[in-house]
Amino acid sequence: MERNDAVMPWVAIVSAAIMWIILLFLFNKETAPEPVVVDPAVVANISKEYPTVGKTVYEGACAGCHGAQAQGGVGPALAGNEKIVQDPVYVHTVIVKGKGSMPAQTQLAENEVYAVANYVLNSFGNKIEEPLTPATVAAGQSKIDPEVLKNRSRFVPDHIKLPEIFLGTFVMVLLSYGLIGLYSVWAEGQELHPGIHKVRSTPVATLAMITSIAMTVLFSVLFVRQMITDFAGWAAAEPVMPNVTAEGFYAAMILLSLAASVALYKKYFMDGEVLVEDASGEFPW
């Protein structure tokens, strides 16, 4: 008897892929900045204004969080900050758009934005060769902000919104259903024959089973060793940050190896019984 649900897992996986593409488009809008209009009058006044106007704006709008001497406080330290010196456009972006707990400084006029940005970039032990201008910002916008790439690489990005949460959840549900369905079709076959079925393992299946179990043991040992190393690092006189990436990789491989062992056992070593499928059934389980 041919299954009536064999095609549904592929439909679910294709739908999940489409949803994932839509989700990527939502994230990618961050890389399409608005064009910058270069005002010659602003450029001419930047070098003249930032030592005075920039200082006034900093003391009024920034010092409360970043410190009077930019030593840091609620906000990060700006004094002697190599990151902002190497990427001055980043300072302009944070002032205009905000970041984390810092809101966008929409109350500042354009000349004040460039004045305070250049004041920070040329004070407190910081120094840039040329003042930050609208032309510099316009050139920098042709690149993707490293913070955007870093955020996008997170398993759960910052500032995730309700549509993205919905799509992400729907993708996971569809993908889970599709993978379970594909496994069901693989384990039970394209056609269902009611009755008890005796299975006999093959040498290849036995080798695959042994390999999957060996991989589970191997990654378990690596995981435990990594955990011991990380705990020792925390307890050291100079604590070392744990290698969370390695821990996560080993844990994931343990689960995948166990899943492979269970799947192989179900397919090649476990006797099964197939009942008559309900004609209205759409779910592989």
Image: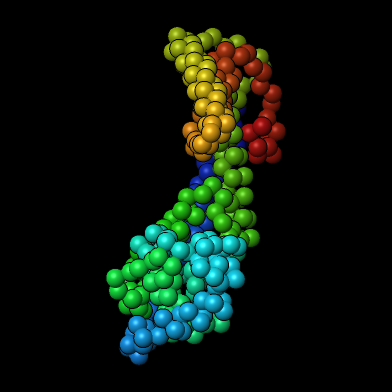
107 w.r.t. 62: above or below: below
Residue in the image at 40% along x and 65% along y:
125
57 w.r.t. 190: above or below: below
130 w.r.t. 249: above or below: below
Nearer to me, 76 or 245 = 76
Nearer to me, 203 or 186 = 203
Residue 229 position in % (x across, y down): 51, 27
Say left or right for 12 vs 38: right
Residue 2 position in % (x across, y down): 58, 30
Residue in the image at 51% along x and 49% along y:
154
Nearer to me, 171 or 229 = 229
Residue that lies at the very extreme toward the left in this rendered image: 129
Q: Using the rendered view, name the quadrant where residue 254 is placed.
A: top right
Residue in the image at 41% along x and 71% along y:
123
Residue in the image at 60% along x and 39% along y:
177
Q: Using the rendered view, name the quadrant where residue 263 is placed.
A: top right
Residue that lies at the very extreme toward the bottom in this rendered image: 41
Nearer to me, 172 or 10 = 172
Any part of residue 197 in sight: no
271 w.r.t. 275: above or below: above
- Quadrant that contains the C terminus: top right
